[in-house]
Image (tube, rainbow, N blue to C red):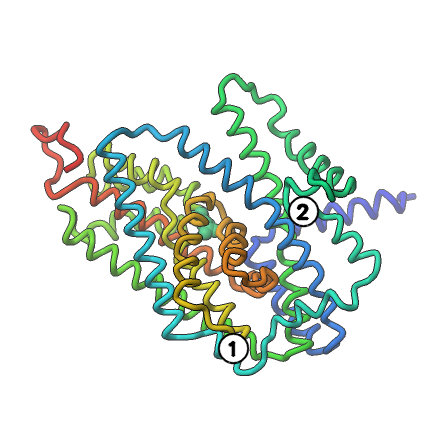
Amino acid sequence: MKHPQTEMSKNVSGLWRLWHATPLYLRIIVAVGLGLVFGVAIGDRAAALAIPSKLVLRLLGALAPPLILLAIVQALMRAQIQGRQTARLISLLLINTVVAIVIGLLVANIVRPGAWAGDAHPPAATAKMSAPAVDPLSQFLDNVPKSIAGPFSDDGKVMGVIFLAVALGVAMRRVRHHEIRTVDDLVHVGLSTLIVILYWVIDVVPFAVFGSVASIVGVKGFSAFLALGGFVLAVVVALLAQTVYYLLRIRFGSWVSPIAVLSGVRDALVMAFSTGSSTATMPLTYACLRENVGLREQSASLGALVGSNFNNDGTALYEAMSALFVSQLIGGNLTIEQQLMIVLTSIAASVGAAGIPEAGLVTMTMVFNAVGLPTDYIALLLTVDWLLDRCRTAINVMGDVTVSCLLDGAEPETAAHDDLIIE
Ligand code: ASP
């Protein structure tokens, strides 16, 4: 006779495998669909379903500061560039990122997708949800640390420390045999551990999406989704405008023709879109630049390998537009000073965003906090992030490609010019 418990654990592990075998974007699409159905079916009562999204956002927010810190430390520590090249690289990266953010803010100011929802301020549903939740669930939520350092502060909770210890302990099992001989090793282990935890959180994002869609639709109806459609459209338009800017820069700032670049790096762009990770795409970007476009070794490696760690124009543009979108959605208008603040924090957040899927969503909490926007509203963006993440990743890679071409200068490589690399 079959043991019922063994049967059950088999079913559970089967379901677990199915969950993992299904691509994240499919899980999110299903979650959006179920969320819509539940929201319509149970109406106001769906408000409480926003709890998982609050939980996921809190976890993402807790991971943001150390991730940013270690990512920047690691990138700086590993970069092998000096003097004039460094200055040129930094100025190119900065100019491109500022242009990306300005394009994003311009499009968001013109299209005003946040206002498409009319008078309804849908994510208020998310805010409302804390009211009915004076129960064990909300107590549990209170014990999930808001930041990694939180549990160690004066009013830190012991439960929070245990939470953190379990997460770190389990995540570090994978790297426990890693030898630590240099500081580089130490930072690498720290960053890999945080990335393991980040992927766990991302794994449960579909539950958050389900809960937030259901609670928004249930409480406020569909107007938020109209606005969200406008937002997706506005982001895509802005990313396309950024691409045009890149192609013009390449046309007038390097020897390569924009068409040749696009066709030479298309594999890297497709890979970026399909993986949502500019870091995973990095080796391919480099190979395309060397073999298909014919850039010099040094320009390709500076732009695509070194610069790539700091250069996330697509992410910067997206974070700035998201902040503006949410402020429009809640009926507020950001002042010029606040928009300037968005520019500055988006630059920092995009530099700190690791080149992995959804990393921009994690660092976005920084931008929202800087201008006092409620981070609850990021839950709404979760529903479309699976698509927009892919688009901005492709632009991140296109940014690296552009910097490499510009570094390569006005003359193609010839034997005589081999060592005359940066103009
Ligand atoms: N997925 C992006 C990348 O790998 C980062 C982001 O989430 O914006 O470049």
Give the percent coordinates (x, y) of residue 410: 11, 43
- 28 left or right of 268 in image: right
Q: Amino acid at mark 1?
A: Leu
With 369 as the anchor, is 259 left or right in this view?
Answer: left
Q: Position of residue 242 (x, y in %)?
A: 30, 59
Instruction: Find residue 154 and report its horizontal and vertical position in percent.
Output: 72, 41
Q: Position of residue 353 (x, y in %)?
A: 46, 46
Dot label at residue 17:
2
Asked which secondary structure carries label 1, the reply is helix
Q: Which residue does the image show at 69% across and 78% down from the upper left?
A: 40
Q: Residues within 10 Å of mark 1 (few under 14, many from 20)?
A: some
Instruction: Indicate if the residue with disc 2 has its beta carbon within 8 Å of ligand 1.
Output: no
- 413 horizontally vs 266: left or right: left
- The mark nearer the N terminus, 2 or 1, is 2
Looking at the picture, tell me which residue is in the foreground, 207 or 163: 163
Taking the spot 16% from the left edge, 49% from the top edge, the residue there is 253
Determine whether 184 is above or below 406 in the image.
above
**What residue appears at the point 52 percent right and 73 percent down from the top-left corner?**
329
Quarter of the figure with the C terminus:
top left
- Tell me the SS state at disc 2: helix
According to the image, label 1 marks what residue?
226
Answer with left or right where residue 386 lies relative to residue 397.
right
Quadrant of the image occupied by residue 338: bottom left
Q: Nearer the viewer, residue 264 or 90?
A: 90
Q: Residue furthest right?
A: 1
